[in-house]
Image (cartoon, helix red, strand yellow):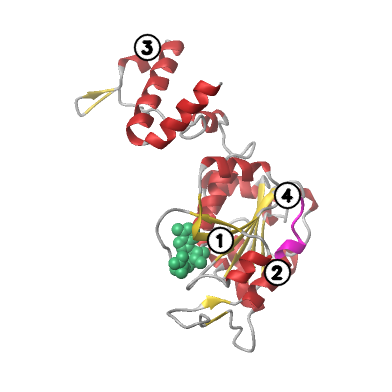
């Protein structure tokens, strides 16, 4: 197998060990040097830069199924930046105790600055800088659509008690949360953001129409889905879906979507109603 731009869609900047992360897409004999080669063929592909203490956690699930195929096909590219390589001293320390005291450790401003500078030096076009954080704006489909229209994104994954606040202010970093709970690190949130964004890029999903019909795309939750068998455990697939009458099916689905949204998400329903009256 020869090395192709496809097999170089995943790059990592940092420790030699972390360079093996793209092994699904990189032939085993590929040397780290080759991984660092510029990839002009991928110049226009949407890019995710991830700053993390755990580069080996990538691509993780992003290397599987449709997302993994799109990565290999060069529809998007993934770069990891190992925070540890910017650590201080012979132990490469990346964190220190909180100013003013208190529990835990905080990622150092100077370490983060060096990692951010390295990543941003390679960033091209519009690539928002985001810190995954429970304090941030909650992820939603509108954010993913905005990010999919950009050239890519730079994601900072925190650990311990988080990052030195001055870095967020200095680089004017947007904080984005996966939800109202606390995880041990930002990596899972980064993967969720990348997955939800990349699937919106042209060519990633086999059937692009599914991103137009699914939950949130039109401000509503999705209607129920059914498949075979037509009768299961005494429950039948709704007759209208087997009728072959596309207009009726569409009307039924829309009515179901509206009913479910109204019952489960009054906030979305209100916003949807507001948009409809202003149209
Ligand atoms: C233990 S958390 C730090 C929590 C922080 N001390 C607080 O109370 O807000 C460590 C890291 O996990 C990530 N993280 C935790 N929960 C998250 C969430 N809900 N969304 C996004 N990132 C999260 C952040 O990057 C954070 O810096």
Q: Quadrant of the N terminus?
A: bottom right
**Residue 126 in sight in this render:** yes
* Residue identifier under label 4: 126
The residue shown at (41%, 31%) is 269
Disc number for residue 243? 3
Say few, some or many: other residues with alpha carbon within 10 Å of mark 3 (under 14 / 14 to 19 / 20 or more). few
Q: Quadrant of the C terminus?
A: top right
Mark 2 or 3: in front is 3
Question: Is the residue indicated by label 1 positioned so its CB lies within 8 Å of ligand 1?
Answer: no
Most frequent secondary structure within the magenta stretch: loop
In the picture, measured across the screen, residue 205 lies left or right of residue 152, that is: left
Say whether disc 1 or disc 3 marks the residue closer to the N-terminus.
1
The residue shown at (69%, 56%) is 8
Labels 1 and 3 touching (C-beta < 8 A): no
> How far is the residue under mark 1 from the one under mark 3?
45 Å
Q: Which residues are magenta?
A: 119-126
* Residue identifier under label 2: 32
- Pinpoint residue 35: horizontal percent, then vertical percent: 71, 63
Mark 1 residue element: loop
Mark 4 or 3: in front is 4
Say whether disc 4 or disc 1 marks the residue closer to the N-terminus.
1
């Amino acid at each position: 197998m020869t090395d192709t731009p496809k097999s170089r869609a995943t790059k990592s900047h940092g420790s030699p060990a972390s360079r093996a992360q793209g092994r699904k897409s990189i032939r085993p004999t590929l040397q780290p040097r080759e991984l660092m080669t510029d990839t002009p063929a991928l110049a226009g592909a949407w890019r995710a830069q991830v700053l993390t203490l755990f580069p080996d956690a990538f691509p993780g699930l992003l290397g599987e199924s449709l997302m993994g195929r799109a990565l290999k096909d060069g529809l998007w590219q993934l770069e990891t930046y190992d925070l540890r390589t910017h650590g201080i001293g012979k132990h490469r320390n990346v964190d220190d105790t909180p100013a003013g005291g208190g529990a835990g450790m905080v990622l150092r401003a100077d370490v983060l600055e060096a990692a951010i500078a390295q990543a941003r030096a390679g960033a091209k076009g519009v690539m928002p800088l985001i810190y995954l954080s429970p304090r941030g704006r909650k992820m939603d489909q509108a954010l993913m659509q905005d990010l999919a229209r950009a050239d890519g994104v730079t994601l900072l994954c925190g650990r311990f008690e988080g990052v030195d606040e001055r870095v967020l202010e200095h680089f004017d970093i947007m904080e984005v949360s996966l939800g109202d709970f606390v995880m041990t690190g930002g990596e899972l949130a980064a993967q969720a953001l990348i997955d939800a964004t990349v699937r919106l890029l042209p060519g990633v999903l086999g059937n692009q129409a599914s991103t137009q019909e699914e939950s949130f795309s039109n401000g509503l939750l999705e209607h129920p889905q059914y498949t075979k068998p037509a009768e299961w455990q005494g429950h039948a697939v709704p007759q209208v879906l087997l009728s072959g009458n596309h207009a009726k099916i569409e009307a039924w689905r829309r009515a179901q979507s509206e009913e479910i949204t109204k019952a489960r998400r009054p906030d979305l329903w209100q916003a949807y109603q507001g948009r409809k009256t202003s149209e």
